[in-house]
Amino acid sequence: MNNKSTPNYFSHESSYVDDGAIIGAGTKIWHFSHILAGARIGENCVFGQNVNVAGGVVIGNNVKVQNNVSIYTGTTIEDDVFLGPSCVLTNVTNPRSQINRHDLYEKTVIRRGATVGANATIVCGVTLGRYCFIAAGSVVSKDVPDYALMVGNPARQKGWMSRHGHVLSRESFVVDCSPSVVGRSSSVVDRSSFVVDRSSNSQQPTTNNQQPTIFTCPESGLRYQLTEDRSSSIVNRSPLVVGRLSNSPQPTTNNQQPTTPPSPQPSTINHQPSTTHFLRCLDLDEDAPLPPDLAKGTRAYDELKTPHVKEQRLGGVRSEV
């Protein structure tokens, strides 16, 4: 059924929305797309040209799906997810034309705020963590941590990405966990008091008082902290020394002195975090939408690149419908 009459959402005259599909208010469905019966789509989503959404798929609010993407049965997509042009999702690991596996579709979950870059492939049966970033052309076959930057085939974690889509690198370390800063709840952080040691070859930035290390996003100023506790949130801001990179010492408390790690060559620094660590935002509720003052970009990605990622191309997902 070509649905043109529903007042709560828009579907182009060349698109098809089957009876039984549920679509939220404000959603837009563009040319040659097909939403099958049984699909459930939230509010204010955008589907580009030639998008297919199968029955049984569940999609949250404010999801953007670029051109030439098929979302198959078994897929759950939470709010604020971005699927880049021609990215690939699957639902059977071992497909054979002769074998009917319609009752064996595998589950894929893409959690809130995740980005999947252009032409990336997500092999079914995995979970992509909140605000993770899958670089263009990558092939993901394992679960991805929250905020992880995944690159290559097979995709490997190369670092962490902020909620605004910027690499949280050595150059973005900030160091200040004094009570006046840690207890701050404002969305934009005043970094004038931060002390960052960029002259040392050590991977562990320091302050005058050896305070804990925290990443900061170069665009928003929001602070992010690595923790070994997956449940840590803005409520739990204990001043652990964190931000451990590969080959760095174990996190320590304020009663212990951090050990200086080896000094790698700048061109060979490994920014891949330990798999036992989790990144959390200190300044915002990660399950809430961004406040309006942080929801609009004001500077291009290239302007905010830190030195060690100047030559990298991460996204391939800059266009929006």
Image (cartoon, rainbow, N blue to C red):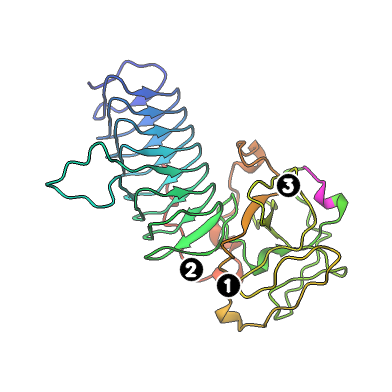
Q: Which residues are magenta?
A: 181-185
Query: Left or right of 238: which side holds 19?
Result: left
Residue lying at 73% horizontally and 47% vertically, measured from the top left: 188
Which corner quadrant of the image does residue 166 belong to?
bottom right
Dot 2 crowding, Cα within 10 Å, few <14, some 14–19, many 20+? few
The quadrant the C terminus occupies is top left
Measured in 3D between alpha carbons, the distance from the residue under mark 3 to the one under mark 2, in whole angstroms, is 27 Å
At label 1, the amino acid type is His
Q: Earlier in the sequence, mark 3 or mark 2?
A: 3
Q: Which residue is mark 1?
A: 308
Nearest to N terminus: mark 3 or mark 1: 3
For the N terminus, give its image quadrant. Answer: top left
In this view, the residue farthest toward the left is 98
Q: CA distance from mark 1 to mark 2?
A: 9 Å
Q: CA distance from mark 3 to mark 1?
A: 25 Å
Q: Which residue is mark 2?
A: 312
Q: Is residue 197 left or right of residue 229?
A: right
Magenta span: helix, strand or loop, mainly?
loop
Above or below, 65 against 158 in this view is above
Q: Position of residue 51 (x, y in %)?
A: 30, 39
Q: Give the secondary structure at mark 2.
A: loop
Q: Is residue 183 magenta?
A: yes
Residue 126 on the magenta segment: no
Viewed as shown, does residue 88 lie left or right of 273?
Answer: left
Q: Is residue 13 above or below residue 216?
A: above
The residue at which mark 3 appears reads as: 188
Closer to us: 295 or 263: 263
